[in-house]
């Protein structure tokens, strides 16, 4: 099973999207290289951190926190359905917001959230 898990980790780390896994308390258990590139936060920075209470706070265009009421991951855990959102995250060291597209998917006892770079027109519209 460890070889299979290593294979999955290698595959996920090879895609450009940022991917992270959270437990049911929304604590991050896996942080991909794509997530590192998008946010500037390393896996060491993020592992064990609450996605809602840590540095990964998602905000809307006005800067309002989305982690409590509009979090796709929390919504997916509540109703078992996939949820998506356009948001911004704070980039480490840059002090700027990064436009992202987030998707929360329920996966048994783990919950998957994926973030990716926005399309160029979305980045211009959201900045």
Image: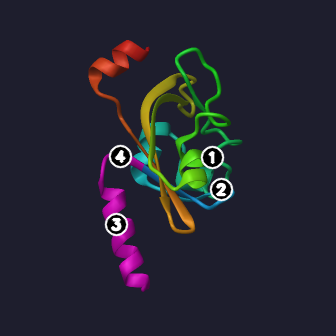
Q: Residue at x 33, y 74 (%)?
A: 7
Q: In whole angstroms, how far apart are the C-alphas of marks 2 and 3?
A: 22 Å
Q: In whole angstroms, how far apart are the C-alphas of marks 1 and 4?
A: 17 Å
Location of residue 73 with respect to 110 vertically, above or below: above
Q: Residue furthest front?
A: 79
Q: Residue at x 66, y 42 (%)?
A: 52
Front residue (pair 88, 82):
82
Q: Residue 17, image x and y in percent?
A: 35, 46
Asked if the stretch drawn in magenta spans residue 68, the answer is no
Q: Is residue 119 left or right of residue 77?
A: left
Question: Which residues are drawn in magenta?
Answer: 1-18
Q: In whole angstroms, how far apart are the C-alphas of marks 2 and 1?
A: 6 Å
Q: Name the quadrant of the C terminus.
A: top left
Q: Name the quadrant of the N terminus.
A: bottom left
Look at the numbered discs 3 and 4 and tell me whether their residues touch, using CB distance below 8 Å: no
Q: Residue 14, image x and y in percent?
A: 30, 57
- Disc 4: which residue: 17
């Amino acid at each position: 099973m460890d070889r299979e898990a290593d294979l999955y980790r290698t595959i996920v780390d090879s895609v450009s999207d940022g991917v992270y896994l959270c437990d049911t308390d929304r604590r991050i258990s896996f942080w991909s290289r794509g997530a590192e590139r998008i946010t500037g936060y390393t896996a060491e920075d993020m592992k064990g951190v609450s996605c809602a209470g840590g540095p990964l706070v998602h905000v809307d265009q006005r800067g309002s926190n989305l982690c409590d009421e509009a979090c796709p991951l929390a919504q997916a855990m509540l109703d078992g359905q996939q949820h998506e959102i356009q948001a911004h995250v704070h980039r480490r060291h840059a002090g700027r917001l990064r436009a992202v597209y987030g998707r929360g998917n329920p996966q048994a006892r783990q919950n998957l959230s994926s973030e990716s770079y926005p399309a160029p027109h979305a980045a211009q519209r959201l900045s």
